[in-house]
Amino acid sequence: MNPPAPNSDRVPPSSGDPTTRPCSDVAVGPLPLTPAPRVCLLLTVRNRSRYLQAAIRSVLTQTFPHFHLIIIDDGSTDDSANLAEALAAQDAAASNSPARISVLRSPHIGRFAALRLAHTIAHQLAPAALLGWIDSDDLLIDTALAETVAYLDTHPACGMVYTQHINIDEHNRTSGLGPRCLVPYTPQALLLDFLTHHFRLFRPELYHAIGGVDASFTAAGDYDFCLKASEHTSIEHLPRPLYCYRIHDDSISTARRLEQIAGAARAIEAALHRRGLSDRLRLKLTIQSSFELIDR
């Protein structure tokens, strides 16, 4: 399965757009959407203008039409916010249905604080909607929502479903399935590897039962969230490659790798404590280095 083709046509900056929600609106609370979408997809972005348009378009081309995309710009200093607003305005103008994108400009508050804010808005707009996250430099395969919504609809005891993902580079070249895709999921296996990587769709009741995203994490907050989820519900694997995970020099997993490892260790130790295992198990962390010479 190939990733969506990148769209090279840049959207001009927006001069103002009714689907954009300024920060002052959040305190009052946006009105619920009518009709209510089945899915709210949440995207936070900070300085990702190079990849953001492709990420948003991969949502807009979903075969499942009943979604709303909430974008939080986390204090970008590049053109990310303008680009998101322009795409929202363009989509609203081209569609006869209610606006499918809401954009909010926020001061820089951090990725997981921004994600928590997005969840607050999603609850105000569509409290019963299923929830999913897409990173601002990644892509959804066009049937991702259709297949994951259908899975949750036919598996009522499942609180979260996750799919396989394809690794891609900055030029959309694929390098096969992520290695985690082939590891069987159990709540115990999740303690040592972030198996529920991408794409995840989950029920709103689960988000609130966990207490939401922990905004104190600067990296690996999504791993912490999934560890908590595994303690509250059945998580099931849909073995279909429905997400493209982009690996590039500026990604968190590359540029902030040590910070991500520290965050993951914190999440694991917290899970051991919650599960009553910390009195007999402790985390041993081994960091392996790799060096490579490349052309300047």
Image (spheres, rainbow, N blue to C red):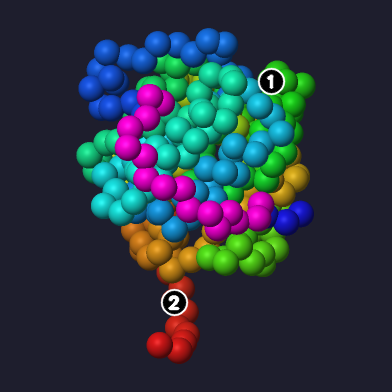
**Is disc 2 surrounded by few (<14), some (14 to 19) or many (20+) residues within 10 Å?**
few
Q: Nearer the viewer, residue 256 or 277?
A: 256
Magenta segment: 4-19
**Percent position of residue 228, x then y:** 48, 33
Q: Nearer the viewer, residue 10 or 5?
A: 10
> Quick one: quadrant of the C terminus?
bottom left
Q: Is residue 62 left or right of residue 295?
A: right
247 versus 12 height, above or below? below
> Quick one: quadrant of the N terminus?
bottom right
Q: Nearer the viewer, residue 208 or 99?
A: 99
Residues tagged 1 and 2 counted as in contact (Cβ below 8 A):
no
Q: CA distance from mark 1 to mark 2?
A: 42 Å
x 59%, y 39%: residue: 59
**Percent position of residue 83, x then y:** 40, 45
**Percent position of residue 3, x then y:** 67, 54
Does the magenta segment cover residue 272? no
> Would you name the residue on which mark 2 appears?
289
**Percent position of residue 248, x then y:** 48, 66
